[in-house]
Every structure is written in structure tokens, then in C-alpha cells.
Amino acid sequence: MAIARTWKSHSVLPGFGLALGFTILYLSLIVLIPLSATFIKSAELSLGEFWAVVTAPRALASYRLSFGAAAIGALLNAGFGLLTAWILVRYTFPGKRLVDAFVDLPFALPTAVAGIALTAVYAPNGWLGQWLEPLGIKVAFTPLGVVVALTFIGLPFVVRTVQPVLEDLEAEIEEAAACLGANRWQTFARVLLPALWPALITGFALAFARAVGEYGSVVFIAGNMPMISEISPLLIITKLEQHEYAGATAIAVVMLVASFALLLVINSLQWWVSHRHGRKQ
Amino acid sequence: MLRNLLLATLLIPPLAYADGGKPILNVSYDVTREFFKEYNPKFVNYWQQKSGQTITINQSHGGSSKQARAVADGLEADVITMNQPGDIDILYQRGKLLPKDWQKRLPHASSPFTSTTVFLVRKGNPKKIKDWDDLAKPGVSVVIPNPKTSGNGKYSYLAAWGYAEKKYGGGDKARDFVTKLFRNVPVLDTGGRGATTTFVQRGIGDALLTFENEVQLIKNELGGSDFEVVYPSVSVLVEAPVAVVDKYADKHGTRATAQAYLEYLYSDEGQELAAKHYYRPRNEKVFAKYAAERFPDIALFSVDEVFGGWDKAQKIHFDNGGTFDQIYTK
């Protein structure tokens, strides 16, 4: 009873019970029921069969590629997304609004279109590919192509999570730091970055999660070779097309659990960082 | 004129319904687009004259196994036109959408025309690719769609295997040959059309392995002078089966139309059109008429002859842990 009162006492508006009920119903319909169907379907396999499917060499290679390329893509986006957000918030230049709008394009573009466009550009006879090929850099149809595609689709996440936080940080704070004798690097590392960390980590987590599940754009540029450039979602589709539904969901369950664990780690990191920062203030 | 056209478009749908001409959906594989684009209006005309009904035909294309799965999962196709019987057997095995003996319902095991797997190489054939052996040589790059997801790729795989078995003997020797060949494949697209794009537009590979009709289409329509067609000494007979999907055709009340749609494929008009699109017609007269110009002589073996049927071929070669998987895991 006492606990219930403290829950409710935070809000001036009534309707907590109804709102919570609706939230749970909504989440169940949209998220929990489809996800539990995945687990139930994979339960058609015995434990031994399940293990054999999810630890097959091809499956292991595909996890490495999917999670590895997604992490690299998200890291690249964390760096360059921060830079982009910085430019968009701190400076005015002609065409700024246009650049701002460009950032969202990877959200809006159908992923298949993105995949075909990237492949056309990076193929050995494409605009960029023909210059990279003589240097011995192959992008399209290699794991590097997967990284390129996953970086592309993850770009907006970091920019859009960091941007509002940066807007709230007034330039006066930087000036104050300078007045107090901080050099430029100290201002960035000691004043700005701690405030930006939580947003940056959230952006990284979103970009990473999006990239792990990405299928549409990757299959065009990856080459899809088993053991080399085959992503886990493609392995799932391949299994479906061989009418192995239980095997497909087994791989899906592994991805689901791994993604959940990774997001949990990232979120606790974010909580820890913001908590530490909060205490310092 | 424009007004008449507008009026016509307004009037057609209600009339069609009044005549009971319901639309039918043909779910097909990846490289039949051009054929059915031309065949459908012909059939609509024919059916209008014969039954007085004006119908529309909707098409769906994609990698054959994916398409078959879509129908098995509930895409309500009235007819299905695939490139290997296994993808239609699935409809019986999962959900009994049609009877087990569906292949007996139309002539030639329900396949109105055939094709085969041949090579397309770049102009001047710089790598001197003449036969299957040349594809397995080091330094040669070959584009083949993924045998796991595409019937087209399965045929290429089996053609190479059949060749090796004839030349080097079966078992391990055939497997070694096919392994060497597939080690030369840089990209595994999920369907035949994707492989064409990779070879033609992206400039990947020294040779493309795909159906004769697709190869000729590329040669004739996509910058023909940049490519040359190579017929190997021997290849696989591609039988493209068709079937009415009984459950959905009955549900939609389109069985008569669907049946006629498939039977018309066997008519002289249908066979002529097939030949025009480089499918080898079953009708011997039509075949003879076009053979010299379009269908070079090539020794063909069927999947039944060499592999004892699709069921067996699927189990040994393409199921999990089969010979195809072993190429990549060993």
C-alpha cells in the first residue's frame, strides 16, 4: 500500500492504473507475443539439435560478422555522428538545414534501395570502387561492404541523440571553462564529454541494435558467402527458404538473447556514466 | 479518345465481375518475367474469345524456393510456375494445397517447356572458358546464384556434379570438382536475376552460370555485344513444372481459368512464345522450327537419370550438412 502511494504520488494527473494496463497490453501485442512465438517455435528442437544448429561453424561465423560489423559501424557512427552533431549545433553555414535533413535520409530510404545504391557505388566498376580496386581495397562483396552498409543505416541514431543534449549545453559553459584556465582539450574532455557520454552511449546502442538486425541493405553488398560474408539474418532467411522453420528460429533466439544481453550491458554502462557524472555536479 | 479510355477503365471492373472473370495470381520464379509479361495478354485475349470473361492476371517473381515458401505460408496463388518439382511438392507436403500426383495432371510431367544451364562469358572470352573444367581452374571467377535459395543455382550445381561424375567418376571425385568450382564463386546471390545483375551491371566474374533463356535475354537485351554464350559439352535438363494450386483456385472460384491458363502453355501459340523467349518447347514441330536458330545441340541429362530424382538430390546435396554445405565448412 505504502509503495503504491509513492508510485502514484509522483503524478498530478489521474489514470495510472489505466495507463499502465494499456502499456502492458500494447507491449504484449507488439513485442512480447511475437517474441515468445520465436521461443516456442524453436522449442520444437531438442536441446541437442538446438545446440547443433546454433553452434554450426556457419552460424558461428555469421554471428561474428553480424555483431562485429555492427559494433564497428556503431563505433564509426559514434565518432563521426558526434562530429556531425557538433557542426550542426555549434556553427552556422549556408545549407545547414539541408545537411540537417540529409542526416535523416538513411531512416527514410527503403533499405533495399540503400543496398543497391551502395553496391553500385562500391562495386569494382562503380564510382568509388574503381578507384579503390587498384589500391587493393575491395568493398562490395566483402565483409568490409557489410560494415559500410551498417554504418550507413546507423548514422542518424548518434546524431539525433547527441544533438539535443549539445543544444542544451550553452556555449557559455565552454567560455567559462576557458576563463577558468582550461585549455581546449581539457574543455572538451572534462567539461563537454562527461555531459555527452550518456547520449553518445544511447546513440551507439541504438545504431548497434539497428545494425545487428539489418537485412535489406546488407544482402546486396555482402556477397553472401558462407563463412565469410554471410550475416546471421541471411542465414535465418536461408533456413526459412529450405523450410527449416525451427532451425531458423533457433538462430533468431540466439541473436535475440545476445542482443538483449549486449543492450543490457550498454544501458547499465550508460546508467553508470550518467550516475557518476550526476554525483560530481 | 481520352474520354473513351477513361470510360473504358471505369467500366471494365464491374463488367469483369458480371462475367465472373476473377483475377488469377501466378507465382513464378525469378527469370520468367519477360515470358509471362507477353504470355498473359495473349491468354487474356484467348480466354475472352473462348469464355467471354475478361480477366486480369497478377504476377509475382522471386527466387523459386522463396516463392514456393510464400505460397505454402499463405500467399493465395491460383497457379504456380516453378523451375523444379521440389518447390511444388512442398505445397503438398505442407498444407496439402494440391494433390500428391500433381505432376501427372499435365503432359510431360507438367512441364510445358525446358531449358538448360549454360555459360555467359565476357566479350572475346578472355579466360578461354569452353567447358566445365575451365570453370574450376584457379584464377577464374564464376557467378552462380545460391543453390540453397534458388532452383537456378541448384541446377548449376547439379550440372557441374553430373559432368564431373561422367568424366572423373562419382563420390569424392565429383565432390572435389564441384568444391573447386564453387571456391571460384565470389558472390552467392539469392536468385537468378540477382546473379545476372552482379555479372552484368557490377562487372563481377569471368562467367555467369544461369538458364539458357536468361543468358539469351542478356545477350539480346542487355548490351549483347559485350558478352558471348558458351555451350558446355554436357549440361542438365531443366524441367520447369507448372500446377494449379487446388485449394486456393477452388477458394477463389478460378479453377477453370487457372487450368486453361496452364493448358494454353502447351498450345502452339504458347509454345511459339516459349521458343521466342528461348525456352525449349516440348512441341517437336515448334522446337524443330527454332532449333537451328535458337537451340544449339547439347547433350542433356535429367536430374532423374543422374541423381535419382529431386527428393534424393535435395537430401544428399542441399539439405543441412549436405555436399553443398561441406564445400564451405571443410
Image (spheres, helix red, strand yellow):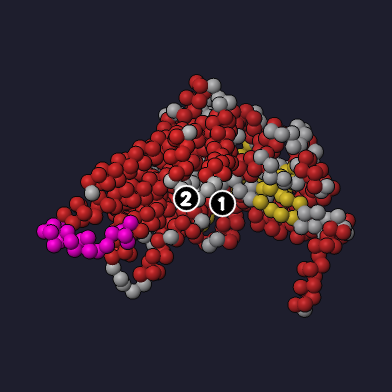
A179 drawn magenta: yes
Q: Look at the numbered discs 2 and 1 and tell me whether their residues touch, using CB distance below 8 Å.
A: no
**Residue drawn at x 33%, y 64% as measured from the top left:** A88
Same chain under badges 2 and 1? The reply is no
Q: Chain of mark 2?
A: A
> Can you give x and y, in whole percent of width and height, for residue A194 in the image?
25, 50
> Can you give x and y, in whole percent of width and height, for residue A233 in the image?
49, 41
> Measured along the vertical axis of the image, is residue B32 above or below residue A5?
below
Q: Which one is nearer the viewer's eye here, B301 or B186?
A: B186
> Which three-letter amino acid code belongs to the residue tagged 2?
Val
Q: Which one is nearer the viewer's eye here, B21 or B225?
A: B21
From the image, state whether disc 2 or disc 1 is nearer to you. 2
Crowding near pointer 2: few (<14 within 10 Å), some, many (20+)? few
Is residue A224 at all visible to an observer of this figure? Answer: no
Q: Which residue is mark 2?
A: A12
> Which three-letter amino acid code belongs to the residue tagged 1?
Arg
Q: Main secondary structure of the magenta part?
A: helix
Is residue A153 at all visible to an observer of this figure? Answer: yes
Residue A42, numbered circle? none
Residue B193, numbered circle? 1
**Residue drawn at x 77%, y 73% as measured from the top left:** B5
Question: For the residues marked 2 and 1, what is the alpha-carbon distance in whole angstroms?
Answer: 61 Å
Q: Give, as a single range, the part of the protein colored magenta.
A: A165-185
Crowding near pointer 1: few (<14 within 10 Å), some, many (20+)? many
